[in-house]
Image: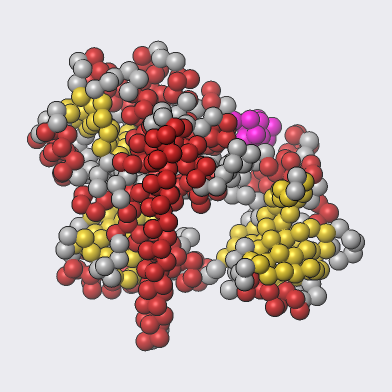
């Protein structure tokens, strides 16, 4: 299906020329920077030269003083500390960072990851009982807890103190923990709101270092974990996250911790590979997530904290095999889900939202199924299964439709819900499912616009092939790390002549394009675009939507275009 191309607004020519002159770049590159909020020399300097010294003062975060004071008290009085985290990438990297760093200063510390199947998402009563029974008086909860109002009252009754470090959207009231660190709190003046859960754990440790006059470089040894969390959790790569991701990727590519190195190797990366955000998103992240989906995520934490190569290799092999199993399971379930949607559509007018329930779908993969369904049908999607006689599931949204708000509007029909505008989790009773389906569909019909439901491709700029020079690409590459709010620039070039067209493995395209009035050409790859093969063979000219990348082949490096979409003239 061809996508509708939407172009980012172009700044004024005056602004473009002023920035281009100030930092000595061409006007296309100046336009790209202005589109990302970089408007002058100082902003460009911060963008291209991120500095760890520019990280915000951690005590600006609400409750940080309380958290550090309680942590210091626990260490001084030799209390047992439990580091508690979610079972996804953000949660496991958070636990590995906080546990790994604090273990240097306090030996009576342990970690706890809830069992996804038995305990579900967030802070569980079982986890609190385990902490109490084993003598843990302080729990640091990471990447979860912001909606744990009732459970915090239970913790108080058992005299277990909690420091909550969470980045999910809070309710109007905070859970009654000793400290709640979340920049999204309405009463929190912390200047950057989009930290990952691991990022907030990092800020707690940064504050701990500052208060106790410890060498912060020891904490920076864990910054590769923060980069993995930022990439895998798809948080904004602007501001403080850009700094953390920049230095975290540097460490990941130079001196990664033993566990991450083992995972990189089993994922097919060599010592010559240069990992980017997208490599983490599509290679490392799914493997770490798979453990929490099908097994117990404690194995992921053990991989990330081990100091022994043999142990790291063993955990990496385990995680890789679980991920292979996960791929087989989600392929079958996705096929079933798509068939269910087709059957629903055949019965009458297609619905605005997709809500599917199958009690034997694996709880750990419903989020993946939802994402796959959106890839095909591009509408808000909720995939539900059953766990302990309760319906549980994951929700994914399309651009512009606030999934968290929609679930909030259905709160009286739900047992639990939480997450972001784009992704959330939920649970409900069986008897509430029909009413939930009806209300959510009504909300989707009221709030979705045709533009939200369209398959679109955002484009930064329209350029000609002659504009793609070695200097242009060199500066373009320095705009990395790429990710949400700083995506890899997407270009369109029109009226190109295609040639040497190949279909690879029956699903990928490889061809060459030439500018219409000269012999300047570029190689193009189009992964998963085999459906365009015949049209491309017959086309005399095309409009190409693409990103620019380096191709390494037989020791030679050249620029090539990676196709995002093709329009035929």
Q: Is residue 179 visible?
A: no
Quadrant assignment, res 97: top left
Q: Where is residue 335 in the image (x, y as percent from the top left)?
A: 41, 72
402, above or below 38, in the image: below
Q: Give left or right: position of 548 versus 169.
A: right
The residue located at (75%, 61%) in the rendering is 493
Q: Is-magenta flag for residue 568?
A: no
Given residues 196 and 559, the one toward you in this image is 559
Q: In which quarter of the image is residue 2?
A: bottom right
Q: What residue occupies the far front of the structure in this picture?
A: 310
How far from the left and from the top, in percent, is residue 311? 39, 35
- Colour mapping used in the image: secondary structure
**Residue at image location 42% in from the left, 66% down from the top:** 331
Say if 391 sits above or below 2 in the image.
Answer: above
Q: Is residue 424 visible?
A: yes
Main SS of residues in magenta = helix
x and y percentages locating residue 278 in the rendered image: 55, 48
**191 over 284 or under it: above or below:** above
**Residue visible at 16% across and 63% down?**
389
Instruction: Give the image location of residue 79, x and y in percent.
Output: 19, 21
Does residue 42 belong to the magenta stretch?
A: yes
Residue 125 appears left or right of 545: left
Q: What count of labels does the image hold?
A: 0
In the picture, which quadrant includes the N terminus? bottom right
Whether residue 133 sits left or right of residue 54 in the image: it is left
Q: Identify the magenta region.
A: 38-50
């Amino acid at each position: 299906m061809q996508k509708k191309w939407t172009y980012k607004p172009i700044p004024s020519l005056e602004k473009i020329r002023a920035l281009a002159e100030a930092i000595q770049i061409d006007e296309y590159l100046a336009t790209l920077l202005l589109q990302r909020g970089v408007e002058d020399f100082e902003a460009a300097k911060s963008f291209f030269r991120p500095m760890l010294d520019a990280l915000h003062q951690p005590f600006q975060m609400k409750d940080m003083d309380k958290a550090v004071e309680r942590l210091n008290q626990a260490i001084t009085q030799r209390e047992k500390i439990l580091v508690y985290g979610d079972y996804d990438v953000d949660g496991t990297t958070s636990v590995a960072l906080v546990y790994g760093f604090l273990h240097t200063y306090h030996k009576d510390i342990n970690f706890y990851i809830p069992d996804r199947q038995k305990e579900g998402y967030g802070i569980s009563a079982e986890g609190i009982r385990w902490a109490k029974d084993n003598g843990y008086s302080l729990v640091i909860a990471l990447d979860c807890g912001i909606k744990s109002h009732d459970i915090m009252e239970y913790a108080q009754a058992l005299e277990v103190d909690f420091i909550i470090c969470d980045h999910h959207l809070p309710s109007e009231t905070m859970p009654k923990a000793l400290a709640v660190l979340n920049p999204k709190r309405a009463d929190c003046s912390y200047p950057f709101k989009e930290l990952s859960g691991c990022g907030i754990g990092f800020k707690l440790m940064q504050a701990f270092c500052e208060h106790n006059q410890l060498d912060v470089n020891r904490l920076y040894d864990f910054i590769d974990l923060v980069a993995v969390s930022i990439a895998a959790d798809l948080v904004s790569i602007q501001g403080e996250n850009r700094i953390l991701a920049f230095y975290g990727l540097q460490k990941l590519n130079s001196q990664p911790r033993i566990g991450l190195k083992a995972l990189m190797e089993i994922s097919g990366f060599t010592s010559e590979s240069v990992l980017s955000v997208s490599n983490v998103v599509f290679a490392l992240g799914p493997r770490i997530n798979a453990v929490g989906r099908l097994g117990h995520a404690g194995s992921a934490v053990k991989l990330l904290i081990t100091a022994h190569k043999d142990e790291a290799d063993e955990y990496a092999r385990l995680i890789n095999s679980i991920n292979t199993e996960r791929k087989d399971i989600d392929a079958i379930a996705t096929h079933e889900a798509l068939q269910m949607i087709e059957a629903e559509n055949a019965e009458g007018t297609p619905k605005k939202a997709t809500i599917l329930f199958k009690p034997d779908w694996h709880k750990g993969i419903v989020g993946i199924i939802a994402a796959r369904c959106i890839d095909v049908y591009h509408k808000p999607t909720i995939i539900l299964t059953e766990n302990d006689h309760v319906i549980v599931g994951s929700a994914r949204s399309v651009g512009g439709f606030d999934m968290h708000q929609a679930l909030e509007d259905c709160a009286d029909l739900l047992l639990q819900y939480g997450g972001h505008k784009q992704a959330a989790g939920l649970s409900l009773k069986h008897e509430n499912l029909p009413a939930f389906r009806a209300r959510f569909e009504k909300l989707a019909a009221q709030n979705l616009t045709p533009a939200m439901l369209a398959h679109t491709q955002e484009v930064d700029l329209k350029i000609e092939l002659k504009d793609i020079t070695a200097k242009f690409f060199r500066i373009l590459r320095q705009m990395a790390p790429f990710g949400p709010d700083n995506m890899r620039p997407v270009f369109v070039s029109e009226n190109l002549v295609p040639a040497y067209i190949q279909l690879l493995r029956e699903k990928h395209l490889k061809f060459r394009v030439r500018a219409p009035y000269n012999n300047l050409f570029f190689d193009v790859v189009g992964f998963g675009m085999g459906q365009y093969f015949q049209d491309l063979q017959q086309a005399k000219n095309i409009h190409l939507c693409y990103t620019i990348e380096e191709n390494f082949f037989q020791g030679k490096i050249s620029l090539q275009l990676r196709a995002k979409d093709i329009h035929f003239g």
